[in-house]
Structures are given as structure tokens and as C-alpha cells.
Amino acid sequence: MRRSVFAVCFAFSICVSSIVVAEPLKVLIVDGQNNHNWQGTTPVMKKYLEESKQFTVDVATSPAKGQDMSGFKPDFAKYDVVLLNYNGDLWSKETRQALVDYVQGGGGLAVIHAANNSFGDWPEYNRMIGLGGWGGRNEKSGPYVRFRDGKIVRDESPGPGGHHGKQHPFHVTVRNADHPITRGMPASWLHAQDELYDKLRGPAEAIDVLATAYADPATGGSGEHEPMIFTVTYGKGRVFHTPMGHSPETMHCVGFITTLVRGCEWAATGDVKSGEVPKDFPKADAVSIRGGRFE
């Protein structure tokens, strides 16, 4: 009897010792300049990433607009994902090259809302983010990308890059339900009031459009189904990009939260193992807000 108890205990100890607890993924949010409220949006994203128990989050805040940027040198290589909440002055050549090397070498990148406005004249940045707006972008920057007649098309029409109508809730329609980021999401769900970016354009190399939103002319939109969740492959790196996320209030949308958490996990690992779509995920006819106004 003693021997059998010992054997069971010994076997249990071996089993327990073989369990490997996954270390949280490390995220670096880069902010400090933006034409949007980065002081409000960074804490919201940090909150929800950390609440998922999958991430630890640090923040690198740049000098203010017009100040010396030469000392702004985030150590991207320390992190699994770099999340850009930045739209402002050009970084130093050294810092720009560090980001290129990081992503090309296999680092994860997340691009949120107005971060795609940045660095219109930096070719490698445009390749990393796939599509961008404003910042002098036009037909020389690359095509518009739209969903028409059941497929993604590249529209080479001339015109500026970047536009949006008035803020409003809008439907996000999943176009690739097999991707880890969108797997299990409803075919269509209602996102909270936001700026619906349209007319984004860029190199759009190695891009996979996972979901779109219709930019209704009635709200000032383009009349096209525009990319709203997409990924880009850049070297060995994975890039997750969403034009959603105008304000702290918008970021409490459960659809945005889920997309953010899944997108960052995918950018870091190439997969999403964070569980099922939350029970409070938006419906086709109902916005779902978690936590109300962030304080």
C-alpha cells in the first residue's frame, strides 16, 4: 500500500513538474505624439491587454512635437510586439532602422488607427503597415484596397490617401473567417461609434484583408467596403493593422478589445490561443461596450 501511494505521488510530481507555464508576451506601446488623444487611448489598450493575462505592457513615450528626437531609442528587440499609437515627428535614422530590423527579423507589429497616418515619406514604414492615410499619400504611394463583388481588389485610381466621414457606429464584416484573429467572430458585428477610415492606400504587399466596413456616402464615406482588420507579412515579421480606435470611449467596444488582444497575440506568435469569442461580443444589431468611460 505504501509503495503504491508512493508511486502515485511520484508520478504526480513528475506530471506537475513537466507543466510549462507560458510566460506573458511582452508588448511595447509607442506613443507621445498623435493627432488623437494618445494620453487617453494608451492606458485603455494597456488595461485590456494586461487584463487578458497574456501580456505585460511597457510604454515608450517620445518627446513632444518639435523637440529633439535623437535620444528617442526604444529597445524594440526586448519585446514580442511593438504597438504603434504614434503619429508625429520623424524618428531618427537609427530608431527607424531599428524598427525595420526588428520586424524583418521576426518581431510583431501592431498598428492602431492614426498610426497609419505617420511617416508618409518613409518607404519601409509604408511597406510594413501595408496601407496608410494622409501624410502626403497619393497614387504614387500605391493602390486603394477594397472589397468588391466578393473579392479583394486593388484600385489604382488617382487620388489622395486617407479620408473619413462623420463618426458613427458601423458594421464590421468578416471576409476571412479562417484566420486566427477573426475565427469564431460573427459574420457581421456592430462596432461602436468611431472614425471609419476610407481611401487608405499604400504598397499593400503581402496583405490579407480579414474584415471590411462599408463607408456609407450617407455619413460622408467613400461608398466602398474598406479594410478594417488586416495583416501584412514583412520579412519574417507579422503585422496586425486596424484603423479602428479613434478615442478611449471607442476602445471599450468589445469588438475592438477582442480584435486588439487577438491581433497582438497573432503578431507575436502566429496563432491565437486565447479562447473563444467573448459572450458579450457585439451582435449584428447591437454595440457592446465594456466598462464604460475609462477613468
Image (spheres, rainbow, N blue to C red):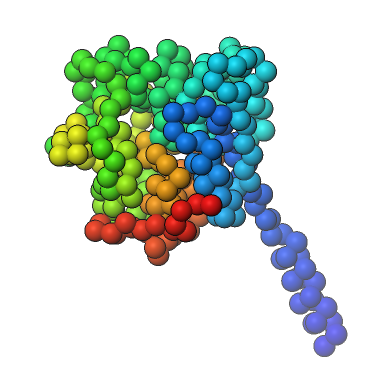
- Give the side of residue 145 with respect to residue 57, left or right: left
Closer to the camera in the image, 144 or 210 = 144
Nearer to us in this view, 146 or 287: 287
Q: Is residue 234 left or right of residue 58?
A: left
| Location of residue 143 (image quadrant) | top left
Q: Is residue 111 above or below residue 289?
A: above
Q: Residue at x 28, y 52 (%)?
A: 190
**Is any atom of residue 295 visible in this view?**
yes
The answer to whether any part of residue 239 appears in the image is no
Residue at 45 percent of width and 14 percent of height: 122
Task: In the rendered view, tell whether residue 2 sits above or below residue 161.
Answer: below
Q: Residue furthest bottom?
A: 1
Q: Position of residue 279 (x, y in %)?
A: 40, 65
The quarter of the picture where residue 35 lies is: top left
Q: Is residue 106 above or below residue 245?
A: above
- Expressed as whole percent of the image width and height from the top left, the position of residue 45 reads 52, 45
Quarter placement of the N terminus:
bottom right
